[in-house]
Amino acid sequence: MTRSGVSRRKTARARGSEDVASHYRTLARSFPNGTLTIFDHELRYLLAEGTGAGGFTHEELEGKTLAQALPPDIRQTLEPLFRGALAGTAGAAEVAYGGGWLVIHAGPLRDDQGAIVAGMALVQEISATRGAAEALRGSEARFRALVENSYDAVALIDGDAKIVYASASTTRLLGYSPPELVGRNPLDLIHPDDLPYARERFAAAAERPDAAVVAEYRVRHRDGSWRSIEGVGVNRIAEPGIGAIVANFRDITERKQLEERLRRAHRMDAVARLAGAIAHDYNNLLTVILGSAEILLHDLPAAYARRDDLEQIKAAASRAAELTRQVLAYSRQQVLTPRMLDVNALIGGMERVLQPLVGGGVELQLQLGGGIGTVRADPVQLEQAIVNVVLNAREAMPSGGRLTLATADVAVDEAFARDHDPMSPGRYVTLAVRDQGVGMDEETRGHLFEPFFTTKPGRHGAGLGLATTYGIIKQSGGYIWAESAVGEGSTFTIYLPWHAPLPAAEAGRRAEAPAATGAGETVLVVDDEPAVRLVTKRILQRNGYTVLEASGGHEALRVLREHPGPIQLLLSDVIMPEMNGREVAERVRERRPGIKVLFMSAYSPAAIAHDGLLEEGAAFLRKPFEIGQLLKAVRRTLDAAGVA
């Protein structure tokens, strides 16, 4: 083709483009939303008319090439789009411009013969719609993150009781992945005992649109265990886009276990308080029975025909006193004489006693850990606690087996203490008693330490062994926990606070027992129980003391006013209706500053001191007492230096 032919072709193309631009200008000016542009084959804008979307105006674009009119980053996006339009391909692109977002649709413009004479681009502002779409996507992302990462699990259950959605948290709670749950009926996972209740709750949710229905039930975990679940369902079946009951649920197994432990602890404390109150009154009666029996036995000749009957009365009263001591041990009101103990040495010394107790069919093993710390406990009572647990283990192994006593020095952290509330973190010496017996179910474990609870058939066993052990350990500042399963044996673990051993120089010396008889000293006996006053008075009078008596504080003050001579000792009960023993002592000391004071009670000194009824370091005598115990306590108090 000649040069003049090419020139004529370009001229015709240009004239055609101009004609096209002129044709569309009027149309573009009335374009309601955006800017219409027309460009030629050199990518020069021939027309730019419309609303000026994105800041494009005809003054800025017309007559300029793409390279002259727009920044390089936008040109890199639009140039291939425009060249494609001039080649006959329609397309679109989004670009950021002027602080907003534009969408540009481009395509070819053809003449009547179908030849491409120019390209056309429609520029529209999409900042608002793009922002809304991004906000929607962001909202969806946040919602999904909230649901998928929530500690609680979420499920959608349709009207046919089928799971149509399950959040990722269901895997953590129940072990099932969401795909494993979708399509299943949730009632298939409910514990059989909870199924009627769960059905009723589901029906309530299905019948009450928009109402929140709360439920609590057990659900089978993927590993076969049962988990306690608390959930709330809201009926959104009629709501477009949801069409399901929205169920939100969480695992409360640990909370339920903690609540059950607290209930058991409260129940045991309530029983302990009741047992202590009964034992207190019972001990007052035993004081009278024992004292009267001993007085009669002392007065009657050895050949008296009915002397055996009195011996039987005294023996029965002594056994009853031992029973009340067991009850009071459970209620943590027993009198203890604690001292520093080496647990390994204590258990090692008990081996000869324990082996006959367990019998020939049971193998006794001692696993005494090295470097075990010292504990502060009453050795006699701690031995009794250990014997009780060992006897319980022997009863659990009717066919024999291995019984292991293992000691260790352990540090209890926050997590372990939290799981064994009300235990405190710290250092403990532990004694674990492990048997290979029949084991226990959960129901039995829940009653283990309750008094008079026994699994022995018939009337065998009083049910006080483990209850006594529980009380001794608790009163010693420790804890005892039982782990067991049916057919897998049991482990009882005693935790006692660790103590550093006392230096040998600080070991207490035993004082020589003072003479038990009196030398004419005057004793004021104050007790609201007439029978106790009477027997106490008779014992003291028969052993060299002058005795005054009063039924309470006000009468004691009257006796002081009326008695002109000296009074060396106040022997007072602690728990009395009108004025307690401590108040009596304070009032008496105001009038007789040098008087010695000896308190007596059926409660332990620790129990009444906790309530502020006993001053620290006060001389104390526990009811019921025998004659020798009373006389020694009185003599010791009178001979003590200073004011008691």
Image: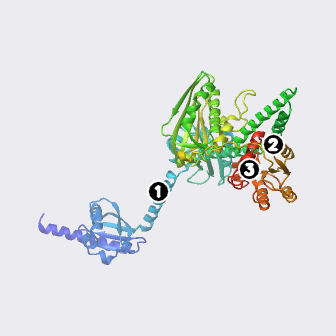
Image disc number at residue 76 = none
Q: Residue at x 44, y 62 (%)?
A: 134
Name the residue nearer the viewer: 310 or 377.
310
Query: Which three-letter amino acid code belongs to the residue tagged 2?
Result: Asn
State the CA–CA distance, disc 1 to disc 3: 84 Å
Q: Is residue 316 left or right of residue 436?
A: right
Query: Which three-letter amino acid code belongs to the residue tagged 1?
Result: Ala
Residue at the extreme left of the image, as rendered: 2
Query: Which three-letter amino acid code belongs to the residue tagged 3?
Result: Leu
Q: Residue at x 28, y 70 (%)?
A: 71
- Asked where in the image residue 543 lies, by quadrant, the reply is top right
Spot occupied by residue 358 in the image (x, y as percentages of width and height): 62, 26
- The quadrant of the picture occupied by the N terminus is bottom left
Spot occupied by residue 124 in the image (x, y as percentages of width and height): 39, 68
Badge 3: few (under 14), some or many (20 or more) residues near its Cα, within 10 Å?
many
Badge 1: few (under 14), some or many (20 or more) residues near its Cα, within 10 Å?
few
Name the residue nearer the viewer: 393 or 560.
560
Image disc number at residue 543 = 2
Residue denoted by label 3 = 638
Q: Is residue 4 left or right of residue 611?
A: left
In this rendering, the answer to whether 19 lies above or below 315 is below
Which is in the foreground here, disc 2 or disc 1? Answer: 2
Per the image, label 3 sits on a secondary structure element best described as: helix
Spot occupied by residue 618 in the image (x, y as percentages of width and height): 70, 52
Badge 2: few (under 14), some or many (20 or more) residues near its Cα, within 10 Å?
some
Count of marks overlaid on the render: 3
Residue denoted by label 1 = 141
Decide which of tag 2 and tag 3 comes sooner along the chain. Answer: 2
Which is in the foreground here, disc 1 or disc 3? Answer: 3
State the CA–CA distance, disc 2 to disc 1: 92 Å
- The quadrant of the picture occupied by the C terminus is bottom right
Per the image, label 2 sits on a secondary structure element best described as: loop
